[in-house]
Image (cartoon, rainbow, N blue to C red):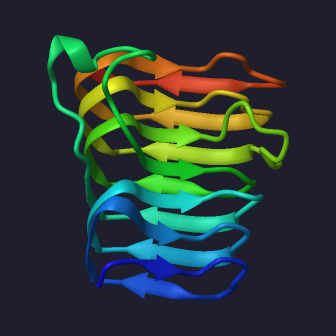
Amino acid sequence: VTSVNMQGVHDVYILGLDIDNPSGTGILAHGARDFVIAGNTIHAQYGIRALDSATNGYIADNVVQGESTWTEASLGASGDNIGEGIEISGPGNVVAYNRVRGFRDNISTLEFESNSGNQRSIDIHNNEILVSADDAIEADFAQGNVRVYDNRITDAFIGISTQPTLGGPTYILRNVMYN
């Protein structure tokens, strides 16, 4: 499979797929609600994108691989890096137990766009995050009750970003970061 488009759907499970789309998006779930994306292997420039107030999503146990490398030229916001591993906006989403590697931002909430959605009650936990050329976890523009905990981060330019927080609280607990 090269990609999955589940925009605007509800009550859909995407399980156990092998998705290969290195210059595109693996799974597009904009505006989806009450959905599960689990147990997939995704190789894409944008692994999983669930924006436009995607609601009550459970994104878990996926392996998401990008193209960014751990070199000095790749690091930072203006570095030679591309893609987002798992990018979400909207309330009630859970991103857990994923292995995400090789993106500009490996796990992020939507930033800098007017349609960032109601970014509340989001849990990002127990993920293995490797080779983040900019942010391993970017919980920017969070609006309340965003919880980032028990993640393991290796090789990240910035481990966890939360700027700005547009409400609160945003909890950052028991994460482990190396290099």
Judging depth in this view, the residue of 132 and 77 nearest the camera is 77
Is residue 178 visible to the viewer in this orientation of the structure? no
Q: Is residue 65 left or right of residue 163?
A: left
Judging depth in this view, the residue of 68 and 156 nearest the camera is 68
- Residue 165 position (above or below residue 1): above
Task: Locate residue 150, reporting x and y percent.
Answer: 37, 35
Identify the image quadrant of the N terminus: bottom left
Task: Locate residue 46, reporting x and y percent.
Answer: 42, 54
Judging depth in this view, the residue of 23 and 65 nearest the camera is 23
Q: Give the mark count.
A: 0
Q: Is residue 162 left or right of residue 143?
A: left
Task: Locate residue 88, reporting x and y percent.
Answer: 60, 51
Q: Which residue is painted at 45% across and 41% down in the image? A: 107
Is residue 146 visible to the viewer in this orientation of the structure? yes
The image quarter containing residue 129 is top left
Q: Which residue is painted at 67% across and 67% down in the image? A: 30
Q: Is residue 170 left or right of residue 83?
A: right
Q: Which residue is painted at 51% across and 34% down in the image? A: 148
- Residue 35 position (above or below residue 162): below
